[in-house]
Amino acid sequence: MTRILIIGPPGSGKGTQAERISERLGVAAISTGDIFRANVKGETPLCVETKKYMDAGDFVPDRATNKMVRDRLSESDVEDGFLLDGYPRTTAQVDYLDEILADGNQRLDVVVQLTADDEELVARLLGRAKETGRSDDNEAVIRHRLDLYHEQTEAVVATYAVRGILTRVDGIGIVDEVTERVILAGQSFCLP
Ligand code: AMP
């Protein structure tokens, strides 16, 4: 049983690594960004409003995000473990996640932070923009998302470091190598 969180700046490859690691561990990956992207295709006012936040590189408000995570974590496929990708991103979300997990007598086993240099991340994301056409991959929005990571999400990383469940992994390199680094780092925290 594994409950793992992957955290990292935009462009650090956390989505790719989340998929690979969750497969290796046999647990479901829960990516708030993916769920939002799938949900905003509609025309309802909520979809349109959520998409505005995403396109601007801003955080979607907690009232929507927290509920979505609580609902997803109450599904039966994650009773025995999960991999969270992209949540929590603020210390308020850490508090909310703590509540959800405490309600189910659960806790995170390990938090893996993928690290990378800002300029490398901007270059990577500009490259990805050409391939995928993601609407939040232009330079101004990329830099805003990086600023938010530094301003808000690094405090989340610090919280888990104090709790003694944080491990840092260099996110630069060949995808396979980074996956091996994550698995190896996680093994010191009871990952199989
Ligand atoms: P990601 O794919 O993780 O980069 O997320 C894409 C976008 O989804 C972010 O820029 C936010 O607009 C939104 N999002 C994803 N996760 C969260 C979260 N935990 N809190 C608020 N907004 C989020």
Image: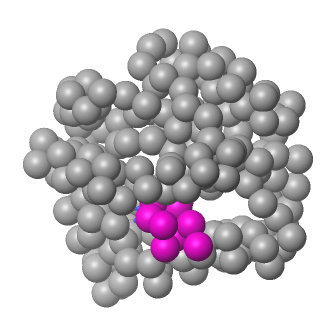
In the displayed structure, would residue 93 be above or below residue 9? Answer: below
In the displayed structure, would residue 70 be above or below residue 36? Answer: below
From the viewer's side, name the closer residue of 150 and 100: 150
Q: From the top left corner, tell me how far across and down residue 167 is, in percent.
A: 61, 35
* Residue shown at 69% from the left, 45% from the top: 165
Q: Quadrant of the C terminus?
A: top right
* Residue shown at 53% from the left, 38% from the top: 113
Q: Does the stretch in magenta take in 7? A: no
In the displayed structure, would residue 12 be above or below residue 86? Answer: above
Instruction: Choose top left, top right, bottom left or bottom right for residue 130.
Output: top left
Q: From the top left corner, tell me how far across and down residue 8 is, in percent.
A: 45, 41
Q: From the top left corner, tell me how far across and down residue 72 is, in percent.
A: 67, 69
* Residue shown at 62% from the left, 41% from the top: 166
Q: Say left or right for 130 vs 33.
A: left
The answer to whether residue 24 shows anywhere in this view is: no
Q: Which residues are magenta?
A: 87-95
* Residue shown at 49% from the left, 56% from the top: 156
The answer to whether residue 98 shows anywhere in this view is: yes
Extreme residue toward the front, this view: 162
Count of numbered circles on the image: 0
Instruction: Choose top left, top right, bottom left or bottom right for residue 128.
Output: top left
Q: How is the image coloured?
A: one colour
Q: Say left or right for 132 vs 93.
A: left
Q: Does the stretch in magenta take in 89? A: yes
